[in-house]
Image (cartoon, helix red, strand yellow):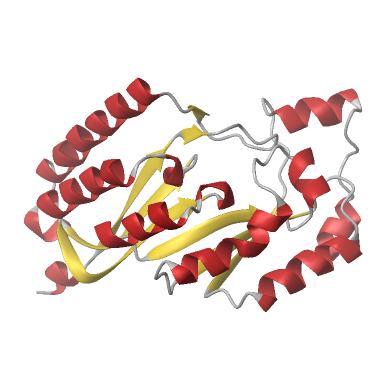
Amino acid sequence: MAEREKKSGIYIHIPFCHSKCTYCSFITGSYEELLVENYISALEAEIRRKAASLLPSQKFVDTIYFGGGTPSIISPKQLERLLSTCLESFHVCQKTEITAEMNPSDLQKSRLEAFRQIGINRASVGIQSFIDLQLKAIGRDHSAEQALTAIEKLHASGFDNISIDLIAGLPDQTWQQWSYNLSTAFSMLPDHLSIYLLEIKEATTLYAQVKSGRVATPDQDLAAQI
């Protein structure tokens, strides 16, 4: 019985984006309809193959997380296919938390309502900053205005479990700017707030920009203070 009570989580990577952020070192690519469809089909096969390799006692799941990349870039029907495959292949608990990472530029009401209808019950929003200049500098494809209305749109679409991501230590970021980002995030009363310290990794656009002097090296002392 103790073995049966052990539960696992499923992470599914959606490696497609509208554009690649300058700091991103994850495996991602541009959205192409045929490529996405082929990837979804391959994921369905991989989910079934993984489940078939496990013992019955290892198939109990209480979290499913769609990360990326940008999961909200694919259609609700494609997400539903992946969720249905998980439900068919694993013992998914009734109150399983099912999260999708979302980009503020994808938060159209009809799309969000469709995500809720298929079973997505938690949204993780990659806001990163509420300042246009910072968003543009790191290659984000949403505006500060879209970031400010993101939580409102999610609540209006029925989401009541919302997480916000912010990045600290951006190039040229001041303490005042960081304080604004943090206080703005708090004012939205998210259920969860993730704060990531900027990492400049090789093979990223940001690394090349800093190395060439086009972008200032982030202030490490300020980053530590933050």
Residue 131, image x, y percentages = 79, 55
Residue 88 is situated, as x and y percent measured from the top left of the image, at: 10, 51
- On screen, residue 211 above or below 171: above
Question: Is residue 126 visible from the viewing direction of this image?
Answer: yes
Picture quadrant where residue 204 is located:
top right
Q: How many marks?
A: 0
Q: Horizontal placement of 22 versus 13: left or right? A: right
Lateral position of residue 61 relative to residue 67, left or right:
left
Q: Does the image show residue 196?
A: no
Q: Residue at x 27, y 61 (%)?
A: 117
Q: Residue at x 83, y 69 (%)?
A: 179
**Residue 102 screen position, x and y as percent:** 49, 52
Rendered residue at 58%/61% (across/down): 150
86 sits to left or right of 223: left
Q: Quadrant of residue 136?
A: top right
Q: Quadrant of the C terminus?
A: bottom right
Q: Is residue 189 above or below residue 57?
A: below
Left or right position of 159 against 145: left
Front-lying residue, 74 or 183? 74
Q: Position of residue 7 (x, y in %)?
A: 24, 65
Q: Residue at x 54, y 49 (%)?
A: 103
Viewer-proximal residue among 112 and 140: 112
Q: Residue furthest front?
A: 110
Give the quadrant of the N terminus. Answer: bottom left
